[in-house]
Amino acid sequence: MHKNRLYIKMAAILGAMAVVFGAFGSHLLREKMTPDTQSTWETAVSFQFYHALGLLAVGILYKRYHSHMLVNAGRFIFGGTIFFSGSLYMSTILTMIGLPGLGMFSMITPIGGVALFLGWVCLFLGMPGNWMKKDAEEKD
């Protein structure tokens, strides 16, 4: 399968699941959530939506610019979203069922955040005409 199609399909799955998780939190969990857990859940859903759109952009751009950095961007954005939003979902659910002591999920969140950051950096570096490539071309 072509990488651009794979990233577009992965973005579609992330987007669809964000809708499901948003509805689940809004309709089924809202009465059981504290303001803190509700805020955490909403952060997870928002970041999942934002990064689904970012991954969609990577898929569209990869069709035109076959850059290894765009491949890395897609990997980091997808993996980062799973780690970041997924750990927030799990942390919220565990807190709601009375198991907040399982803090391992909150330790995964920053790893996901760093991966998301690296994904956006790779997206920038994967595009033609960015300032780093321009400086390298001028030295030649």
Image: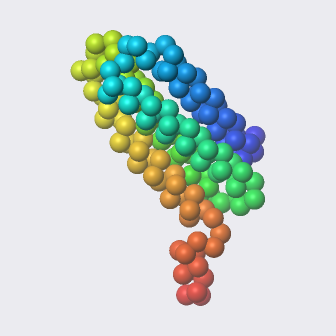
Residue 52 image point, x, y percent: 59, 40
For image coordinates 64% across by 51% down, the residue present is 58
Residue at image point 60% right, 62% down: 126
Q: Quadrant of the N terminus?
A: top right
Measured as percent of width and height from the top left, residue 77 is found at 53, 45
Q: Nearer the viewer, residue 24 or 130?
A: 24
* Quadrant that contains the C terminus: bottom right
* Residue 67 percent location from the top left of the image: 65, 60
**Which of the two residues, 130 or 53, is positioned nearer the viewer here?**
53
Q: Position of residue 121 (x, y in %)?
A: 50, 59
Q: Residue at x 45, y 52 (%)?
A: 117
90 vs 120: above or below: above
State which quadrant residue 37 falls in.
top left
Going by the image, does 48 lie left or right of 107? Answer: right
* Image-quadrant location for residue 98: top left
Look at the picture and state if 76 lies above or below 94.
Answer: below
Task: Give the total number of marks visible in the rendering.
Answer: 0
Q: Residue furthest left?
A: 101
Task: Answer yes or no: is residue 82 visible.
Answer: no
Q: Is residue 130 visible?
A: yes
Q: Identify which residue is drawn at 53% across, 26% down.
A: 22
* Rendered view: 21 above or below 129: above
Name the colouring of the figure: rainbow
